[in-house]
Amino acid sequence: MSDLMKTLSVAALVAFGALAAQAQTPAAETPAETATETPAATPTEPAVAADGVGTNGLNLGEEVGAEASEGGVGSTYVQAEHGDWEVRCVRAEEGKDPCQLYQLLSDEAGNAVAEISIFGLPAGQQAAAGATVITPLETLLTAQLTIAVDTAKAKRYPYTFCAAAGCFARIGFTAPDVAGFKAGAKAALTIVPAAAPDEKVVLNLSLKGFTAGYDAVNAANGN
């Protein structure tokens, strides 16, 4: 999912001049009109210091390190797959890579509509797990979203904010909620489109592989 960014473009023009020197001929026996010119000095490559600054004071740049390249710090990778879930982790500069349990949700036509990421929380809190659900920008926020496991009653959750990537709902699951996910076969995530407030879009949230994936995420995060 993408952030709004502005790119500044800077152009620099540098002019290099060459000095021409003229050698004077001796006055004796040589007419003044026959002065001989010396060739123009040939420019040489400027020396480059360790910090990338040349002798003329211009910074010549340096190669981008691994932290900004593909597979570097901050990049996301799939550590494992469990059923219909992926264990997605982010490469950290130090320590263990934080991981989440991820699933992309599609409609009946196979179009990607929403996504959900779930991660366990340390014991002793009211919420046993946290989750982030991202829906399209055209979602009716006031209708909120609902999640129902199998035939259990649905729970309603509010949206937190919207950005260029979509509308985000940051929600918490209690221990009974997590137990329901582990024991269930499938769940239904329902959203309402802003263009059709009387309609509901029901997305199938598969629970196949949830238990193994959830336990793997907790083990990776040290919970």
Image (cartoon, rainbow, N blue to C red):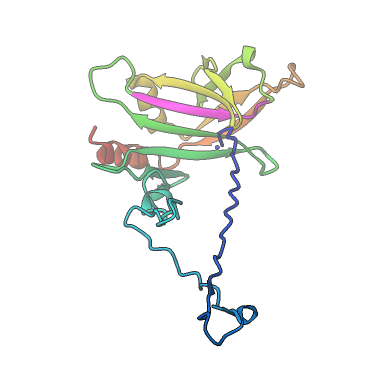
User: Viewed as shown, does residue 185 lie left or right of 8?
Assistant: left
Q: What residue is rendered at 39% in x and 22% in y?
A: 177
Residue 119 at what x, y percent from top left? 36, 31
As for residue 27 lying within the magenta part, the answer is no
Q: Considering only vertical position in the picture, is 75 above or below 182?
A: below
Q: How many marks?
A: 0
Q: Is residue 123 visible?
A: yes
Residue 57 x, y percent position in the rendering: 43, 51
Determine the residue positioned at 63% across, 12% down. 142
The quadrant in which the C terminus is found is top left
Quadrant in the rendering for residue 144: top right
Instruction: Check the image and report above or below for 8 versus 127.
Output: below
Residue 166 falls in image quadrant: top right
Residue 3 spot, x, y in % from top left: 56, 34
Question: Is 36 left or right of 80, judged from the image as shown?
Answer: right
Residue 12, image x, y percentages: 58, 49
Q: Residue furthest top?
A: 142
Residues in magenta, as a range: 129-137
